[in-house]
Amino acid sequence: MAVSTVSVPSPRVPPEGEGYASWYGRVLGWAVVGGPPVQLVTGVRFDVLELPSDAGAALLRGPVATGPVALMGRRMRFLVAAGSADELEGLLGWLEWGGVALDLAALGAGGRITAPAPPGTGCGKGPREAAVWLRPPEKGCEALLPALPAPGRGAGPGCGPDLVRLVAAAATECHRARLGRRTARDRQPLAFS
């Protein structure tokens, strides 16, 4: 009597990031574009203020309130209210930072960022270039993202963080970081061949 053997395949391990899309869509209701890597669509539920990580780290140590913050390589991404990207250039001009090279950018409608590993997944231990949450998002966090105050109302109790204060602090930290990098570079000894 011949014994038939049935081969059972090994459990399928999803590629890193495949489960991210469902988490972002199901838990947060955010628009994603499949990958790899999975990307979050900006301009719908949030925009992104992006700056060098050294400036971002200084900003996080300061007194200015922020929303969720992600790190990818040497760039920090601060989530701000949808539509805020359109305000960046005008705010920088109004704050008298117009024309200064700051390495500060905003991503709004039509933009995308690499989706960090969802909080608590243990997947944030990838390569140094992998996106990770420093301050992860929570369901409904869009209502508390930094935004311009409503006309006739200043920032106050019940309002989210102030976009003007965040942009002012980000511009200051970007400028300080740029000057610090330049000073460190100038202190290096000259190499003669």
Image (cartoon, rainbow, N blue to C red):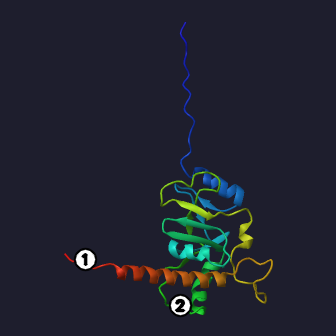
Which quadrant, please, contains the C terminus?
bottom left
Q: Are marks 2 and 1 in contact (CB under 8 Å)?
A: no
Name the residue located 45 percent from the left edge and 81 percent from the top edge.
180
Name the residue nearer the viewer: 131 or 61. 61
Picture coordinates of residue 60, whole percent (x, y): 61, 73
The image shows residue 75, relative to residue 184, as above or below, that is above
Picture coordinates of residue 63, whole percent (x, y): 66, 79
Picture coordinates of residue 152, whole percent (x, y): 78, 90
Q: Amino acid at mark 1?
A: Ala
Dot 2 corresponds to which residue? Answer: 98
Is there any visible trace of residue 183 in the rendered image?
yes
Name the residue located 71 percent from the left edge and 78 percent from the top edge.
161
The image shows residue 136, relative to residue 173, as above or below, that is above
Disc 2 crowd rating (10 Å Cα; few below 14, some 14-19, many 20+) is: few
In three-dimensional space, the C-alpha distance between marks 2 and 1, rounded to whole angstroms, equals: 36 Å
Is there any visible trace of residue 110 in the rendered image?
no
Dot 1 corresponds to which residue? Answer: 191
Name the residue nearer the viewer: 88 or 180. 180
Query: Which quarter of the picture shows residue 91?
Result: bottom right
State the SS at label 2. Answer: loop
